[in-house]
Image: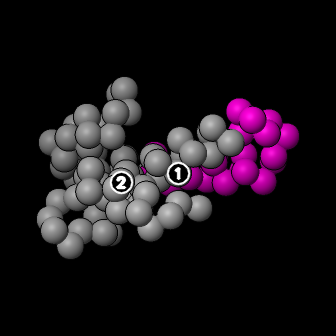
Amino acid sequence: MLTPEEKQKAINKAKLHEKDTGSPEAQIAILSVEIDRLAKHLKKFSKDFAAKKGLLKMISKRRTLLGYLKNEDEKRFNEIIKKIGLGK
């Protein structure tokens, strides 16, 4: 679980306006930070199957949000990919 400060940092990277917390871009940014944190955890504790299941769920949710954004507005999709650094 991310601390509120970590979440705010991730949102600040991708927010659309000052009070943005729920846009697809903000959600993708938060999920990306959580995915990175869990991936590091799983490198250390490879047999933590509950964490692995959670990681796969987060990856799936991020993929769904990215697909939605790509269908709705490809310009925003490309911007978030660059901001977050997802080499697509």
Q: Secondary structure at mark 2?
A: helix
- Name which residue lies at 78% across and 54% down: 50
N-terminal of the two: label 2 or label 1?
2
- The answer to whether residue 24 of the structure is visible from this angle is no
Point out the residue furthest to the right here: 47
Read off the residue under disc 1. 34
**Which range is magenta?**
42-63
Horizontally, is 60 left or right of 40 in the view? Answer: left
Q: Position of residue 19 (x, y in %)?
A: 20, 73
- Does residue 22 sit above or below 56 in this rendering? below
Q: Secondary structure at mark 1?
A: helix
Read off the residue under disc 2. 10
Q: Is label 2 in contact with label 1 (beta carbons under 8 Å)?
A: no
- Name which residue lies at 44% across and 67% down: 4
Is residue 48 magenta-colored? yes
Amino acid carrying label 1: it is Glu
For the residue pair 9 and 58, the one nearer the viewer reads as 9
Q: Position of residue 22 (x, y in %)?
A: 32, 69
- Does residue 41 sit above or below 20 in this rendering? above
Q: Position of residue 68 (x, y in %)?
A: 33, 53
Is residue 52 magenta-colored? yes
- Does residue 49 sit above or below 82 in this rendering? below
Amino acid carrying label 2: it is Ala
- Name which residue lies at 14% across and 65% down: 17
- Does residue 85 sit above or below 74 in this rendering? above
For the residue pair 1 and 80, the one nearer the viewer reads as 1
Point out the residue furthest to the top here: 87
